[in-house]
Image (cartoon, helix red, strand yellow):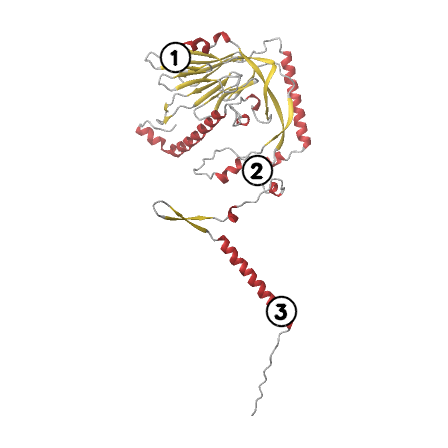
């Protein structure tokens, strides 16, 4: 039986062979690119020789990995949120006028400055004058109580009040901190131990947040107010929401029972139409015109009269503040038979303007806050910038203290039974 074997050779066409060669070449090129990219991304090792002949390897990232491309004029980065455009707001222009002391015959600085230095009965320094516009008043324990100074290149003087320091009710030692700031322009603010504002006033009026009734008390000095000036101002957006990316939280935050405002509501407020904004501006103009008419009808009384009961604010055992009207604002210091009365009352010269700033009328009490209480008006070149930074530190320390007290509050009953001194409130 014979079998025939046939061998068939299948030849590829020339076109297919050429295509396969091209594909192989492309694959080789891509592979070479990947290898080259891996070589570039490989960390660079640089040996550094020290005097004691020890070799330390320092790994540096290549420039390609640390370079960020950004273009300010590119609208793409506006959509991504990298470039933040200013927001247009209708704000009121507040004018500051020149002031004169209401009671120059009671100027304590002129009365005692020739003494140069005064002492308590135990020979501790009570008052020290260190210049033509500088003086200090001290507590009986030797710490600074009131600092009187004239900021450089400014036409007004400032009073900075400090706490005596020492141990608080929890037995924790606390250093002296700022509890009040005043100037001779008619601005002033009093703070508590945690940096919160108790009372704040300016040339227009004031607000007393630490009112015993629990409701903030607001007042105006009842001066003749001109027609309000409303201007379109461009302000920067708040960048508070970006802090979480740079400063991750290290402590647990205790949330309050207050309901947070939904993001949708805030976005709807931002997307107000031009008609709504125009309506708000017209409403504000009508309200201000009504107030001006009321002020004109009451011109039969004194322009600086304040038809309120006297306001007394006790800062500590030695310092207190009394407010009757613009001309009668008294800061009093009393310790060990030593008494100092500082008159902060002013008289406005409505014919001479010395400055201006803008306030947002939609923010509550914005028109009655002084510059020490409103961080928007404080700039790095301002004379009160250092005071503002110090108040920010006080608020941060108070927040940490509150978190610590929340942590140990469940053990309050045990501490009461033990009778120890360090107990949370």
Q: Position of residue 83 (x, y in %)?
A: 59, 39
- The residue beneath circle 1 is 117
Q: Nearer the viewer, residue 6 or 12?
A: 12
Residue at left 62%, top 8%?
300
| Mark seen at residue 386 | none
Element under label 2?
helix
**Is 293 above or below relative to 74?**
above
The tag earlier along the polypeptide, 2 or 3, is 3
Marks 2 and 3, how far apart at CA? 62 Å
**Is 64 above or below relative to 405?**
below
Element under label 3?
helix
Q: Position of residue 326 (x, y in %)?
A: 54, 13
At label 2, counting other C-alpha atoms closer than 10 Å, the crowd grade (few under 14, some 14-19, many 20 or more) is few
Q: Position of residue 301 (x, y in %)?
A: 60, 9
In which quadrant is the C terminus drawn? top left
Q: Nearer the viewer, residue 207 or 334?
A: 334
The tag earlier along the polypeptide, 1 or 2, is 1
Res. 89 image quadrant: top right
Q: Nearer the viewer, residue 415 or 390?
A: 390
Tag 1 and tag 3, C-beta contact below 8 Å: no
Is there any visible trace of residue 35 in the rendered image? yes
- The residue beneath circle 3 is 18
Q: Position of residue 15 (x, y in %)?
A: 65, 70
Is 230 placed left or right of 336 in the picture? Answer: right
The tag earlier along the polypeptide, 1 or 3, is 3
- The residue beneath circle 2 is 263
In which quadrant is the N terminus drawn? bottom right
Marks 1 and 2, how far apart at CA? 59 Å
Marks 1 and 3, how far apart at CA? 103 Å
At label 1, counting other C-alpha atoms closer than 10 Å, the crowd grade (few under 14, some 14-19, many 20 or more) is some
Residue at left 50%, top 40%?
245
């Amino acid at each position: 039986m014979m079998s025939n074997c046939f061998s068939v050779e299948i030849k590829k066409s020339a076109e297919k062979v050429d295509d396969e060669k091209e594909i192989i070449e492309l694959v080789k090129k891509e592979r070479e690119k990947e290898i080259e990219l891996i070589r570039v991304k490989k960390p660079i090792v640089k040996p550094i020789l020290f005097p004691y002949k020890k070799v330390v390897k320092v790994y540096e990232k290549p420039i390609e990995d640390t370079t960020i491309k950004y273009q300010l004029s590119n609208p793409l980065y506006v959509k991504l949120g990298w470039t933040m455009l200013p927001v247009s707001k209708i704000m009121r222009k507040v004018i500051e006028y020149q002031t004169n002391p209401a009671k120059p015959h009671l100027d304590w600085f002129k009365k005692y400055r020739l003494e140069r230095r005064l002492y308590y009965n135990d020979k501790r320094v009570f008052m020290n004058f260190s210049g033509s516009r500088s003086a200090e008043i001290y507590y009986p324990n030797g710490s600074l109580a009131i600092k009187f100074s004239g900021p450089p290149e400014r036409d007004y003087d400032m009073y900075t009040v400090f706490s005596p320091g020492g141990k608080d009710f929890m037995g924790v030692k606390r250093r002296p901190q700022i509890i009040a700031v005043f100037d001779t322009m008619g601005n002033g603010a009093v703070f508590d131990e945690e940096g919160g504002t108790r009372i704040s006033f300016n040339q227009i009026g004031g607000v007393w947040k630490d009112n015993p009734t629990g409701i903030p008390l607001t007042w105006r000095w009842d001066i003749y107010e001109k027609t309000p000036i409303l201007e379109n101002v461009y302000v920067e957006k708040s960048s508070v929401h970006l802090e979480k990316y740079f400063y991750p939280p290290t402590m647990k935050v205790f949330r309050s029972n207050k309901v947070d405002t939904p993001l949708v509501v805030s976005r709807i407020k931002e997307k107000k139409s031009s008609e709504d904004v125009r309506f708000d501006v017209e409403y504000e103009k009508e309200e201000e015109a009504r107030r001006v008419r009321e002020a004109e009808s009451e011109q039969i009384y004194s322009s600086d009269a304040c038809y309120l009961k006297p306001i007394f604010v006790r800062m500590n055992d030695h310092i207190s503040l009394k407010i009757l009207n613009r001309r009668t604002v008294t800061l009093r210091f009393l310790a060990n038979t030593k008494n100092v009365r500082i008159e902060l009352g002013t008289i406005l010269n409505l014919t001479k303007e010395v400055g201006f700033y803008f306030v947002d009328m939609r923010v509550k009490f914005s028109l009655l806050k002084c510059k020490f209480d409103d961080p928007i008006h404080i700039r790095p070149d301002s004379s009160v910038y250092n005071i503002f930074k110090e108040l920010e530190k006080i608020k941060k320390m108070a927040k940490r203290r509150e978190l610590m007290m929340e942590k140990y509050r469940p053990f309050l009953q045990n501490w009461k039974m033990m009778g120890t001194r360090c107990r949370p409130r």
